[in-house]
Image (cartoon, helix red, strand yellow):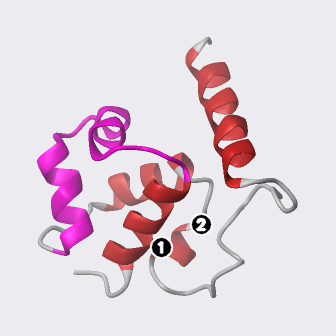
């Protein structure tokens, strides 16, 4: 288990308004695996950790506990509400999927 990762995953998932099922679909795993990551019963592989960092627009350093809160975002979304941030992320995801 990666110390602090379960809480960060729950926080990020909630912040962006995503369900465990939605995360699982984007990662290509079952919702029970995502649940295991959030409870600390499972540890994501390096590949999944990289996918999580891309999904949440954060660094792997942050997910691994190497960065302090506030340094986790790779895209500057300061000044936006949580709803606006989720909309930006959804827009980027839809653009990626349209390729």
- Residue corresponding to mark 2: 59
Q: Position of residue 73 (x, y in %)?
A: 69, 64
Q: Which residue is located at x 68 percent, y 36 percent?
A: 87
For this rendering, which residue is in front, 24 or 2?
A: 24
Q: Label 2: how many residues lie within 10 Å, few (<14), some (14-19) or many (20+)?
A: some
Image side of residue 7 versus residue 58, left or right: left
Q: Position of residue 26 (x, y in %)?
A: 38, 35
Q: Quadrant of residue 97?
A: top right
Q: Which residue is located at x 61 percent, y 85 percent?
A: 67
Q: Is residue 64 magenta?
A: no
Q: Residue furthest top?
A: 98
Determine whether 53 is above or below 8 in the image. Answer: above
Image side of residue 54 versus residue 21, left or right: right
**Which mark, by number, is residue 63?**
1
The segment highlighted magenta reads 16-40
Q: Which residue is located at x 67 percent, y 21 percent?
A: 95
**Image marks 2 and 1: residues in contact by CB distance under 8 Å:** yes
Q: Quadrant of the C terminus?
A: top right
């Amino acid at each position: 288990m990666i110390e602090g990762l379960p809480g960060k995953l729950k926080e990020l998932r909630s912040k962006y308004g995503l369900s465990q099922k939605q995360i699982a679909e984007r990662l290509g795993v079952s919702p029970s695996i995502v649940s295991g990551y959030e409870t600390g019963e499972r540890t994501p592989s390096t590949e999944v950790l990289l996918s999580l960092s891309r999904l949440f627009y954060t660094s792997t350093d942050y997910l691994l506990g190497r960065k302090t809160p506030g340094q986790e975002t790779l895209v500057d979304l300061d000044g936006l509400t949580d709803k606006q941030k989720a909309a930006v992320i959804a827009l980027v995801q839809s653009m990626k999927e349209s390729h």
